[in-house]
Image (spheres, helix red, strand yellow):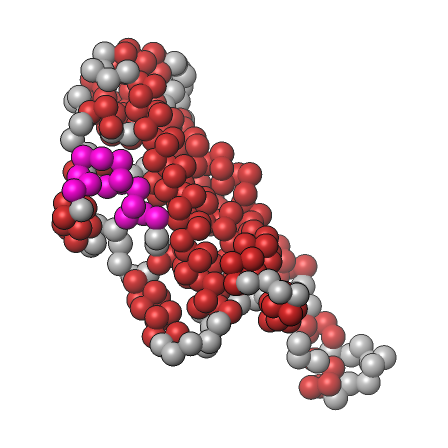
Amino acid sequence: MVNVRKLLKLPPGDTRNSKRFSRSVGGNIAITTVVLLMAAVLALPLVYAVISAFKPMEEIFIFPPRFFVQNPTLDNFRDLGKYISDLWVPFPRYLFNSLIITTVTTTGNILICSACAYPLALHRFPGKKVLFDIVVVALMFVGQVTFLPRYLVMAKLGMIDTWWALILPDMATSLGVFLMKQFMEQLPISIIEAARVDGYNEFKIYWHIVMPNVKPAWLTLVIFSFQGVWNDTSVSTMVFTESLRTLPTALSQVSGGGIARVGAASAASLLLMLPPIIMFIFAQNRVVETMAFAAIKE
């Protein structure tokens, strides 16, 4: 840590010019105001989605549109329940598929990404920097860019129209490796060396020493992975058997029935948003802590 007093050549008891390193009350108020305004702007789409789920049909199509609902109703949820009950596959089956696929994929993502990040962060070997640079470059590509190669690989493996076509490709992500590697680098190397002296092998060091100390990182990765898999809408191009499809696919079929189902579509969107939001609320402090350590360093 830089010693400010030493740089300024101030004696230990000298407090002159100390105010220049502290923010004024007006500065605190200005920064708080800006942050609150940004938070309000970012929250508007979420708030509007919640409000729209309770709007009656006549308020959805009113012009000019109103942000707040005048006569809230639960008819949209009743209509959604009616449409769901008319599906060929029972609704609990879609929910079960989503829960299984999301749980298995998220668990695998944590294990694989952390195992890949462990040698990149705490070991030295030829090509280490090149491998990490490839991971960083891969962060620029969205999932849609790699969709065709993903489909071809799954087809070659004979996994199209199975759960594995949805699970395996998302078990390893560049974002997961990046976050875990950056956070693992903060661990003191003395802890690792002490564990080796005590006879711990690499797996024990990884599982009993590293993983408990990077809990904020993999909890953050749980949120990101859960959200991505839960809201995945590319299921219909990988799975064709209706009984294997997930909840977002079923709700998209319900809401794609035209203007008459706009209200039900709003209710479906709210239901899909709830699980990721609830998970984020319980782990938001871990997310902030992880982001503080995730900056790219030389």
Q: Is residue 167 magenta?
A: yes
Determine whether 63 is above or below 171 in the image. Answer: above
The residue shown at (34%, 35%) is: 101
The residue shown at (44%, 58%) is: 115
Residue at the far front in the pictured view:
199
Residue 6 percent coordinates (x, y) = 73, 85
Residue 128 visible from this viewpoint:
yes
Viewer-side residue, 129 vs 272: 129
Residue 12 percent coordinates (x, y) = 83, 81
The residue shown at (70%, 80%) is: 4
User: In which quadrant of the rendered view does residue 75 lie?
Assistant: top left
The residue shown at (34%, 31%) is: 98
18 relative position to 192: left or right: right
What span is colored magenta in the figure?
Answer: 158-171
Determine whether 113 is above or below 236 in the image. Answer: below
174 relative position to 154: left or right: right
Viewer-side residue, 159 vs 110: 159
Residue at the far bottom in the pictured view:
9
Determine whether 176 is above or below 137 in the image. Answer: above
Residue 46 visible from this viewpoint:
no
Q: Is residue 254 magenta?
A: no
Assign the N terminus to one quadrant of the image.
bottom right
